[in-house]
Amino acid sequence: MKSKPIIIGVAGGTGSGKTTVAKEISCQFNEKSIVLIEQDAYYKDQSHLDFNDRLQTNYDHPLAFDNDLLLEHLLKLVNRESVDKPVYDYAKHTRSNETIKIEPKDVIILEGILILEDERLRDIMDIKLFVDTDADLRIMRRLVRDINERGRTIESVIDQYTGVVRPMHLQFIEPTKRYADIIVPEGGQNRVAIDLMATKIRAIIEEKVIL
């Protein structure tokens, strides 16, 4: 019987580099032994709302996420059961009809801005990381991402950042830093932290195999 998978949480503000950190750690392992779960995939379904109402969604608020479903899926993966991860359609501002089948792995990396805000999620994590990056770098990265990947204008990104993203970061995301076991400065540029995390994960895996 296989041992319980290791769950690594990687949190941090928008544009902090948490996704890069999660992917860089993943790249150091065989793809058959590790899987990356993005909290962004678990934004709530809004198909019951009119499109104009969907446009008002605050994606940086804890209530935007379907953490009940996320927790259900994580527990299934822990029990070595496969799940159908949702796919979010940012153009329609709701969950798409597509899903991605995720098979259980020895290591699960959960990445997202508010994964440390929910106590239920924190309780099933073996290691909790918070990627800490200066606000000016984070806003520039968000600008590039939203313009190139989500078809946004510079003005709309800046308005959203100052009106919603920054206040939500200060109210909900930044305080979760206190729950982290490790704080990683400068995101994906911090090779030392990434290599140390990979080494730690290998040690945990080897310990479980021995036990």
Image (cartoon, rainbow, N blue to C red):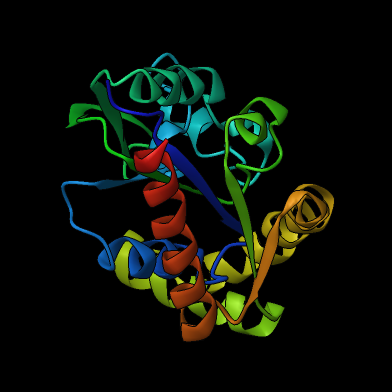
Give the image quarter of residue 38: top left
Residue 187 seen in render: yes
Residue 87 image offset from top left, x and y in percent = 28, 35
8 to 131, vertically: above or below: above
- Drawn side of residue 163 relative to residue 191, left or right: right
Query: Residue 115, located in which quarter of the rendered image?
Result: top right
Front residue of this view, candidates 6 and 159: 6
The answer to whether residue 167 is left or right of residue 85 is right
150 w.r.t. 86: above or below: below
Q: Is residue 87 left or right of residue 93?
A: left
Label total for image: 0
**Residue at (31% x, 64% y) in the render:** 149
Residue lying at 41% horizontally and 40% vertically, measured from the top left = 208
Above or below for 187 versus 72: below
Can residue 151 be seen in the rendering of this structure?
no
Quarter of the figure with the C terminus: top left
Q: Where residue 32 sits: x, y (%)? A: 16, 47
Specify the farthest residue to the front: 210
* Residue sitting at x 44%, y 76%: 195
Q: Which residue is found at the position 35% from the left and 70% from the top?
A: 24
Residue nearest the observer in this picture, 163 or 129 = 129
Above or below: residue 96 compared with residue 179 = above
Quadrant containing the N terminus is: top left
Residue in front for this viewpoint, 208 or 89 = 208
